[in-house]
Amino acid sequence: MAHTSSTREIPQARSVPRHLAIIMDGNGRWAKRRFLPRVAGHRRGVEAVRETTRACIDRGIEYLTLFAFSSENWRRPADEISVLQQLFLAALEQEVDKLHANGVRLKVIGDIAAFGERIAGLVADGEALTAANRRLTLTIAANYGGRWDLIQAIGKMVRHHPEQHADFTEEQLSPFLAMNFAPEPDLFIRTGGEQRISNFLLWQLAYTELYFTTTLWPDFDASALESAIAWFLERERRFGRTSEQLSAAERVAQGSEEGAHKFG
Ligand code: IPE
Ligand code: IPE
Ligand code: MG
């Protein structure tokens, strides 16, 4: 089933974000403050992934998308890239069974062929094993870039419509985007204090609420998530409408609820 496009229809209001997308930033600084090598920060970062995944399940969040390695992170020193790949490999080997036991569906988006056959094989196996799970969809963005995603999707869309040369629509493009299986994120969190998107989900963040915190990723936990959700619940999501329109729509919804109580 196709998910609602925030620019085509108005998504249903919810009491918790349905889809949370996170830029997990600040591992290096966390380590530096402790006079440890950057790698130590990445290791603690994996712990924060475990804790956040658990907290999202407890909170009833349906989709959690984590930016683990960007298409620009290849610019880092070779030894750091190698450690990040080893951590990803170890996580795939050690965590997939646990995710499965907890009803988590694993998805990986990005050009993962670049990580070699072993990682690509584990990703394919993990995705296949957990494909039917629906408690939480955990998506890891690895060698992912928003621009890469748009370019690959446009290429596929054009090949899919060999007779068409112009006037493509949103509906024609969206099935080819890497996150075609998920609704658009309701809430975006970036830890580490920077206020930028760093080539994450460029298309999908069109109407997402953006939350920036100075908490470094290894320190992120269930209570930090709770603060972000509390902030999210205070936002008025207008999707282009006026505030007055929203309160009128709310009154109508409340009225029909009262009506249901009276007559139901
Ligand atoms: C995020 O932490 C992890 C990755 C980008 C892989 P960083 O490694 O970017 O940490 P800082 O930003 O240098 O502190
Ligand atoms: C964004 O963090 C990418 C990930 C968290 C994987 P970076 O640390 O790479 O972002 P910049 O370079 O500060 O924008
Ligand atoms: Mg960083």
Image: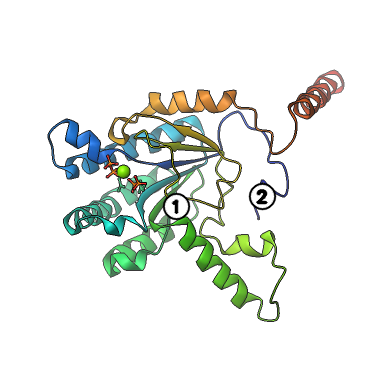
Mark 1 packing: few (<14 Cα in 10 Å), some, or many (20+)? some
Residue pictured at 14% horizontal, 42% vertical:
37
Alpha carbons under labels 2 and 1: distance apart = 20 Å
Above or below for 113 versus 257: below
Instruction: Name the residue tied to disc 1.
Output: 199
Amino acid carrying mark 2 in the image: Ser
Residue pictured at 79% horizontal, 29% vertical:
245
Above or below for 157 versus 254: below
Residue pictured at 24% horizontal, 43% vertical:
42
Q: Does 161 sit left or right of 48 as displayed?
A: right
Q: Does 26 sit left or right of 178 as displayed?
A: left
Above or below for 172 versus 21: below
The dot on residue 242 is none
The residue closer to the viewer here, 69 or 196, is 196
The residue closer to the viewer here, 70 or 92, is 70
Instruction: Write down the quadrant of residue 102 in the picture.
Output: top left
The residue closer to the viewer here, 20 or 240, is 240
Q: Is mark 1 within 8 Å of ligand 2?
A: yes
Instruction: Write down the quadrant of residue 217 in the picture.
Output: top left
Secondary element at tag 1: loop
Give the mark, 2 or 1, whose residue is nearer the N terminus.
2
Q: Position of residue 68 (x, y in %)?
A: 35, 49
Instruction: Name the residue tied to disc 2.
Output: 5
Picture quarter with the C terminus: top right
Q: Does 71 sit left or right of 32 as displayed?
A: right
Amino acid carrying mark 1 in the image: Asn
Residue pictured at 58% horizontal, 46% vertical:
184
Secondary element at tag 2: loop
Q: Position of residue 22 (x, y in %)?
A: 43, 41
Picture quarter with the N terminus: bottom right
Residue furthest toward the bottom?
A: 163
